[in-house]
Amino acid sequence: MSKYLWYSGATDITGIALAEALHIESGKVKPRGKDIIIGWGTKMLDRERDENVDLGNAKVINHPNAICKNRNKLNALEMLKADRHTANNIAAFYTPNNVIRGIDRGDISFPLIARKKRHQGGKGLLVCLVKSHVVKAIEYGADYFQAYIDIKTEYRLHVFDGKIIYAVEKVENPTESGWINQRKEKVLEHANKNEVNLDNATVDYVLGQLVKEAVLPDQIVRSNKRGWKFSGINTNTIPDSLKNAAIKAVEIMGLDFGAVDCALDMSDHPFIIEINSGPGLQRTSLEKYIAAFTKKFAEIERPAERLAPRARRVAAAAVGRVEEQENQGIDDVALVHMMNAVQSPAEARRLLDLAMRRR
């Protein structure tokens, strides 16, 4: 089966590395005629953002339509808040239209975090301590305001097919040398990506000057640019309430996988912050995704080998013998197997007819 990883400009470094490790094609353009497509933080054209992207009969892992919904962080918060499984795991948020009224009525308290609905990392984050900060943030174009979470511990949980495959905790990286090394790695990554040659001594000098202006670690924005780093941990140390919320959040957004930024507050209440559909990966995390995708490819390419003998016979109905199997009685499990075996629109229509007759 032909495979393709569709990445965006912001996710191309990891996207390319992942595709090369999986030995599959990749690119920023919409694929055509592929059997299996991975959406890796896929960024669609402006005209496609509010439309359904048709990828034909391809098996899509993280469909661009779901990625588009998740990229709009305000939309994602609204979806997660509306679902009873995650409603209590989302910090209160407000639109510019109602935040001022809420402050004036005393219904909304500070501090608040102002964000754009499409953002990456800590870029564009504004901390609002008083009403004038909110007014200024609205002038700057903030799309929503969210209650500040008094974080005790912050995590990134990598969810794939309803399971956590890797987990990291954000820990302080306050030393100047640690900050310089981390920033240097990112700077050189971007320079290589854009075919820019940077003198090593110059990079060291510039970062050495910049670190003197940094307050490390930043307790408001916990990013690698501000004195924090990810450290791998055993998932058994994470409360089930947070793990379950992360898994459910990925499902609600219609994603097959995602790196969920989440946290426990000072009272150990679990919060979902956001989901990354094209996270940056290195070393262990990259290996975990390679293994997960390799396993997923095998499941897609050899579905019949995993079925019991009777289920195989039932699945065969999806490729030409639906009518023969109908009189034997098709249970729900068998119907699912048949759906997995569908290979063409014609087979899908016949299977749909069978399902409708069972009702």
Image: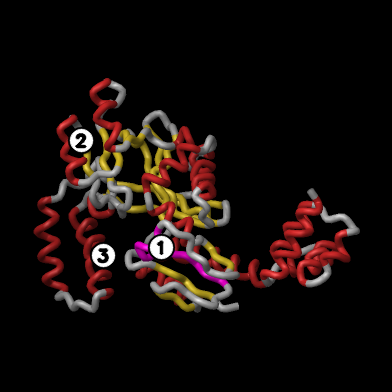
Q: Earlier in the sequence, mark 2 or mark 3?
A: 2
- Residue 180: x percent and y percent? 20, 60
Asked if residue 237 shows in the view, the reply is no
Q: Nearer the viewer, residue 134 or 286?
A: 134
Callout 2 environment at 10 Å: few (<14), some (14 to 19), or many (20+)?
many
Q: Nearer the viewer, residue 101 or 277?
A: 101
User: Which residue in the structure is indicated by mark 2?
Assistant: 134
Tag 2, which secondary structure?
helix
Q: Amino acid at mark 1?
A: Glu
User: Which residue in the structure is indicated by mark 3?
Assistant: 186
Position of residue 130 in the picture relative to residue 286 (left or right): left
Write down the quadrant of residue 131 in the picture: top left
Which segment is the magenta one? 36-49
Point 27% across, 70% down: residue: 189
- Residue 67: x percent and y percent? 44, 57
Q: CA distance from mark 3 to mark 1?
A: 31 Å
Point 41% across, 63% down: residue: 48
- Residue 232: x percent and y percent? 42, 53
Q: Earlier in the sequence, mark 1 or mark 2?
A: 1
Contact (Cβ within 8 Å) of mark 1 with mark 2: no
Asked if residue 96 shows in the view, the reply is yes
Residue 48 numbered mark, or none: 1
Question: Which is in the foreground here, disc 3 or disc 1?
Answer: 1
Q: How is the image coloured?
A: secondary structure
The quarter of the rendered structure image containing the N terminus is bottom right
Question: Which is in the foreground here, disc 1 or disc 2?
Answer: 1
Q: Nearer the viewer, residue 74 or 284?
A: 74
- Above or below residue 135? Residue 124 is below
Q: Earlier in the sequence, mark 3 or mark 1?
A: 1
Write down the quadrant of residue 13 in the picture: bottom left
